[in-house]
Amino acid sequence: MENNLSTENSLRGMICGTGQVMFQQNLWCSLLFLIGIFWGAWAEGRISVAWGGLVGLIVSYLTGRILGLKAEEGEQGLWGFNGVLVGCAIMTFLRSTPLTWCILIVGAAHTVWLREGLNRIMAKWKVNSMTMPFVLTTWMLLLAARGLNGLPIEGLSSPMFPHAATAHIATGPLHLLLYWLRGIGQVFLIDSWITGLFFLAGLIAANGWSAFWAAFASALSLAVALLFDAPGMGISEGLYGFSPVLTGIALGSIFYHPSWRSALWAVVGIVITLFAQAATNSLLAPLGLPSLTAPFCFVTWVFLLPMFSLEKHPFSKKRETPSHEADHSDWNPSRKPHLKR
């Protein structure tokens, strides 16, 4: 399929791939996300993570152009959001070498056609692949790195049997504030509370409801993680927050019209995502793999597949028969480009 994009639209669409990680098609939001990524990576002494994300973003966008995918998806930034995550992840878990950059480029390109294929399979269920192309591609490359000396592992945990690690962490108000912000920053694998602030600012610029649900989801997941005595290091680094943040945004502001019914739906989804995160961590511990955003994908699919219309009054006796083109709600379709096929 031929795509025709002007230079301005091409640049805007490429940058918006960053915002689409959190479902936002907004240039200012995407730029603030990029600033947050570079700030956090520089502050951590891992600037290669930011450059990896940028390279992944560019490569995945160009791959969409070369494959001739729908121009509309390119303008919305839908070619690039998996690629930017792959770039950040590869440079987080592997040492920066020429060969590592080569597989980063291949992996970012791979997410584009993997997304296209998964979306075709899942279209009949009115859901799409979310960030699963990023997850599957990154898992494949990290597993390959365990058997290839040319891909030196740097930030990846050693394989181990799952166990409940214990570590005491400070729980004063200031510390909790930092953990909360890190939960938002970790969406892009950045352990920085300042990055979390940049991400919140970007969400506010794009969509107030999405900003609210990101903030609320990080706070709720932090509270539940503390209540159930999750590993202290994971809590302090925000590792129990990033998947719930994505679930909160998706269920609270993107796929359903904000209302008290969708709010309850989103709250339950956020809590379940935290347990899915803990379960996925345990499942993958023997492989030494991170869960990435897989818990968000699993839970969001489970909550979208029933096709509940939360627009209806819960006590209404009238029951409409869903049409073949039924969607998850009557929310503005332009707000849900990830469901378009």
Image (cartoon, rainbow, N blue to C red):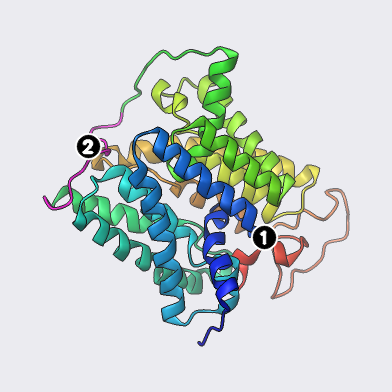
Residue 30 in percent (x, y) is at 58, 53
Residue 230's place in the image compared with 110, above or below, is: above
Q: Say which residue label 2 marks.
A: 159
Nearest to the eye among marks 1 and 2: give it.
2
Residue 305 in percent (x, y) is at 60, 59
Q: Which residue is at a point 23% across and 54% down the rendered structure image?
A: 100
Q: Which residue is at a point 58% across and 23% down the rendered structure image?
A: 177
197 part of magenta stretch:
no
Residue projecting furthest to the left: 149
Density class for disc 1 (Cα within 10 Å; few <14, some 14-19, many ≥20) is some
Number of callouts: 2
Majority secondary structure of magenta residues:
loop
| Magenta segment boundaries in residue numbering | 148-162
Secondary structure at badge 2 equals loop
Residue 161 visible to the viewer:
yes
Mark 1–mark 2 Cα distance, whole angstroms, equals: 39 Å
Residue 5's place in the image compared with 138, above or below, is: below
Residue 313 in percent (x, y) is at 86, 51
Q: Amino acid at mark 2?
A: Pro
Q: Say which residue label 1 marks.
A: 307
- Of residue 145 and residue 322, the one placed in the foreground of this image is 145
Secondary structure at badge 1 equals loop
Residue projecting furthest to the front: 7
Residue 32's place in the image compared with 327, above or below, is: above
